[in-house]
Amino acid sequence: MSEDQDVNNNPGEPIQDQDTAPDTSADSAGSNLLEASNLASTVPSIRNFHQRVESATEQDVVIAKRRAIQAIMKDSSLADEQKRMKIQELMSGSRGTPVEAMVASTGISSVLPPTLTLDPIACTHYERKCNIIAPCCGQVFGCRVCHDDMTDAQGHGHGPLDRYAIREVICKECNTRQPASNTCINCNVTFAEYHCGICNLWMAESKKPFHCDECGLCRVGGQNAFRHCYQCCMCIDVRVYNTHNCMKDKYKNNCPICREDMFSSRQSPQDLPCGHAIHAHCFRKLANFDYRCPICKKTVVSQESMADAWVARARDIEMQPMPPDLARVVNIMCNDCEIKSQNRNSHFLGVQCPACNSFNTVVEHVVSSGCDTYVPASAPSS
C-alpha cells in the first residue's frame, strides 16, 4: 500500500500506493471455499472451487500487461525503436505517435535537454498530464511504476524510484520541464485532479486518494472509509476495524507468495483467519491448489465451513481402505488444532485428527508398516 494504494481492509479493496487495502475478511475466501466443501468429496470440491476463482480480475490484467512489457524489453533481437513501438501498440493500439514525428511536429528537442529520452508510451497506471524525471537516472517516465517496470526489464538494476525524491516534471501539453507541482508554469494546465506534494503523486479523484500521515503514503478508497491501526501499521476499513485480527507490523512483511513488500505494494492485501496477510490476487491463485495458509499451514476457512468436506473425505477413506502391504500406522500433528495424536492409520487421502476431525495433518513418525499394522477404529488413538 502506498501513495496510490487502496487502503481497503476488505476483499478486493486496495491500499496505499497500490490502490489497495488489507482484506481483513478472511472468510470472504471462506465463503467461496465453503461452496467447495459441500461437494461430494474434498478433492473434487476444491477442484471445482478452483474453477470458480479463475476469472481474471482487473489487477491480473494489469500484471499480465506489465509482464508483457518486460518481455519486450528483454528481447535483444529488437531495436530500441521497435521495443517502443511494440509496447505502444500493447498499451494504446496504433494510436501512438512515433518519437521522430513527435519531435519534428512539436520541436520538443529544443525544450528537452539532450540527456533526456522522450518516451511516447502512455502511462497506464495514473491519469495525469505530466511525466516525471527520475532523480536516479535522469530519464523521463510516465510515473514511478513505469520507471520500475522498465528499468527492471532493461536490467539497469538501480532499484525502485524514490517517490519522495522527485523534483522535476515535464508537461505533456507543452513539453516544458519544470519543478514538481500540479500546475504547468508555461500553459497553466492542471496535471491531475489529485496531487500530493509529499508523495509526488498525480492521479484522478475517482479512486478517492488521500494521504495518511501515519503510513507516510497516499492510499485510495476515501479517508473517511479507513482508520489507521498503529499496531498493524496500516489503514484498516472502518467496517472491520473493531474486529480485525491485530498483529504488530503485520503488513510490513513480504507477501509469502510473490515476495513483494505488502506495505508499499500496489496490490491489495488480504487477512487470513490465522492472522497472516497475503496479496488478495496471490491468495486467489493459491486457492487453485491449496486451502492452507502458506506460512502456518492452518486451514484458511473455519472448521465449521470445512466440516462437510472432512466428512466426505472420511467416507472416501472408509470405502477405499489401504492394501495390507501398504498399510502404515503413524503419529501425526494437526496443523489446525496443533494437537498430536498417536497410532493413526495412514491413508493416501490423508490422516484425520481425532480432536478436531480435520485432515490438515502431517505425519511426524511412522510407527509400523506392512501387514498386521491396521489399528481398529475403536482402538484408542491419542
Image (spheres, helix red, strand yellow):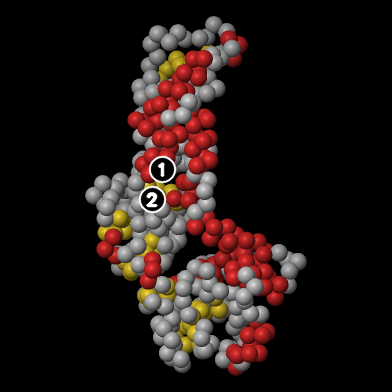
* Depth order, front residue of 316/161: 316
Q: Which residue position holds label 2?
A: 11
**CB atoms of marks 1 and 2 within 8 Å:** yes
Instruction: Write the residue at 37% across / 53% down.
Output: 22
Instruction: Write the residue at 37% across / 32% down.
Output: 305
In the rendering, at what x and y percent does residue 329 appear? 50, 15
Q: Which residue position holds label 1?
A: 29
Q: Is residue 251 visible?
A: no
Decide: is 1 above or below 353: below
Q: Secondary structure at mark 1?
A: helix
Which disc, if any, is residue 86?
none
Decide: is 35 above or below 370: below
Q: Label 1 amino acid?
A: Ala
Looking at the rendered structure, the number of numbered marks drawn on it comes to 2
Q: Is residue 67 visible?
A: yes
- The answer to which of marks 1 and 2 sits earlier in the sequence is 2
